[in-house]
Amino acid sequence: MTEWTRICTLEDIPLLGARRVERASGLDVAIFRNSQDAVFALLDRCPHKGGPLSQGIVFGTSVACPLHNWTIGLCDGQASAPDEGCTPRFRVKLEEGVVYLDAAELHGHASDLVRPIAGPVRRPVDWI
């Protein structure tokens, strides 16, 4: 039996937008809401160069990566041809306006993937 973790309400996700769910390990999860109020969840990483999909443009059942405009399917995480690649998807349940993620997936799914090297560098305190 699936255990679900309450994440937010549908209204907390902007229409045609996304929110990020931070995880203790691994990359964050991006939750998307399309124009039909359908909700999807993918790892917040484009399979191309690791762009943050949560900052992409949502249209139909796809999101365009903000870095290089790759189109990623929200239902399956697959890049649209001619591009190739996939980002892990997470199971979502929307019930009475509340969004839930599968608790087991939230804590373990794709948690071994490494953050892309982009943006500000996170240096250890004793780096200098």
Image (cartoon, rainbow, N blue to C red):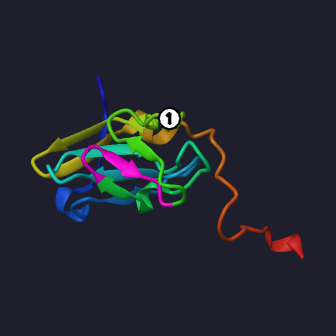
Quadrant of residue 68 within the rendered picture? bottom right
Q: Is residue 55 above or below residue 89?
A: below
* Position of residue 50 measured from the top left corner of the image (x, y, whole percent): 59, 51
Residue at horizontal 48 percent and vertical 48 percent from the top: 70
* Position of residue 65 measured from the top left corner of the image (x, y, whole percent): 47, 54
Residue 42 falls inside the magenta stretch: no
Outermost residue toward the left? Answer: 96
Q: Quadrant of the C terminus?
A: bottom right
Residue 60 falls inside the magenta stretch: yes
Q: Quadrant of the N terminus?
A: top left
Asked if residue 5 shows in the view, the reply is no
Asked if residue 34 shows in the view, the reply is yes
Camera-nearest residue between 56 and 111: 56
Query: Where does the magenta region start and end?
Result: 59-66
Residue at horizontal 19 percent and vertical 56 percent from the top: 10
The amino acid on which the numbered mark 1 sits, given as a three-letter code, is Pro
Camera-nearest residue between 70 and 39: 70
Q: Which residue is mark 1?
A: 82
Camera-nearest residue between 127 and 89: 89
* Position of residue 43 measured from the top left corner of the image (x, y, whole percent): 47, 45
